[in-house]
Image (cartoon, rainbow, N blue to C red):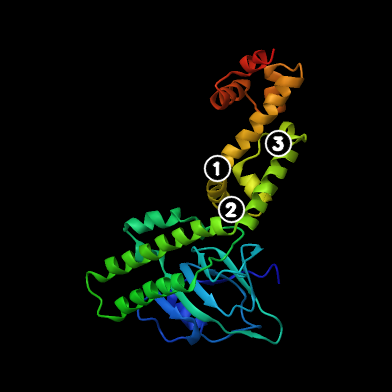
Amino acid sequence: MANVKPYRVKTISEFYQLRGLPKPEHPLVSVVNLETLESIQVNEPKSVVFDFYYISIKRGVNAKFKYGQQEYDFDEGIMFFMAPGQVFRIEVEPHSTVKLSGWILLVHPDFLWNTQLARTIKQYEFFDYSVNEALFLSEKEEATMTGILQNIQQEYHANIDKFSQDIIIAQIELLLRYSERFYQRQFITRKISNHAILNQLEELLTDYFNSDDLVERGLPTVQSVAEALHLSPNYLSGLLKVLTGQSTQQHIHDKLIEKAKEKLSITDLSVTEIAYELGFEHPQSFSKLFKTKTNLSPSEFRQSLN
């Protein structure tokens, strides 16, 4: 099953057909009440790729959802986001079905064409998490989000005119801005799991800088660190910004400077040798970064110890 090609759903009309719904009222934007969907059966395609944005508020989840290769955490969350072209997998227990309640917003990229949102939607980090934590909503917040979805539905139910697209786009932007607010709050309120990630990052960087990886592979990248923690780069940096005020790159640099100071303090290695041991191809780059971080050159730092 792992090698089965994902089932691609190219249009919103195809999604409606797959889920046993009548033809959508608007081909490029649609709000679906999950209670109107046919139950997800165990023998239907489980791994799917949508060619449109998929934003969902779900209740009654009793199946495993995977986004990419990682399980989606629905333990405390009910809302999640997918961008076009991303693989989504539903795992249903044998001889069972999944019946959900909630709402789905489907937006085809063509609906956003030539609008500001077509450019800014890519900036919302919750669309590209590699390990996904569903967004938790309080009852009041869920009511707010549901109200926006119903406004969108009501707008395209009405007679479409020259104002319709702008009004719907404005409602989608409002939904995304609220989502961004709630995600930032979630970074803060889920402190235990978030601080566990911070501890894992510290251990990862410490082990890396104490090993031969620096010489063999060079400095760790934001991408490689995020992958090791099973997070997307944007999610990790966003989380660290909230917890520490610093990005992933800044954390890497801080660990690097800490290791450089150690080598400058307790070894007789030259600055050039230390630069190479720390994964720099060019010693000048090491010296420049060190001075930027400490206001001293490596040599000046070493002299200050005497």
State the residue position of label 1. Answer: 247
Q: Is 183 displayed left or right of 270 in the figure? A: left
Residue 150 in percent (x, y) is at 37, 77
Quick check: can you spot residue 279? no
Above or below, comparing residue 47 to residue 270 in the picture: below
Residue 217 in percent (x, y) is at 70, 36
Identify the residue at image location x=65%, y=63%: 70
Instruction: State the SS at label 2.
Output: loop
Mark 2 and mark 1 lie on one chain; the one further toward the N terminus is 2
Instruction: Looking at the picture, tell me which residue is in the foreground, 251 or 115.
Output: 251
Mark 3, residues whose alpha carbon is within 10 Å: few (<14), some, or many (≥20)? few
The mark found on residue 232 in the picture is 2
The mark found on residue 221 in the picture is none
Quick check: can you spot residue 252? yes
Above or below, comparing residue 281 to residue 164 in the picture: above
Instruction: State the SS at label 3.
Output: helix
Per the model, the C-alpha gap separating discs 3 and 1 is: 22 Å
State the residue position of label 3. Answer: 217
Residue 23 in percent (x, y) is at 40, 84
Per the model, the C-alpha gap separating discs 2 and 1 is: 13 Å
Mark 3 and mark 1 lie on one chain; the one further toward the N terminus is 3
Mark nearest the camera among 3 and 2 is 2
Mark nearest the camera among 3 and 1 is 1
Per the model, the C-alpha gap separating discs 3 and 2 is: 21 Å
Q: What type is the residue that disc 1 sits on?
A: Ser
Mark 3 and mark 2 lie on one chain; the one further toward the N terminus is 3
Instruction: Looking at the picture, tell me which residue is in the foreground, 205 or 93.
Output: 205
Above or below, comparing residue 114 to residue 30 in the picture: above
Residue 60 in percent (x, y) is at 58, 80
Instruction: Looking at the picture, tell me which residue is in the foreground, 163 or 251.
Output: 251
* Location of residue 269 (image quadrant): top right
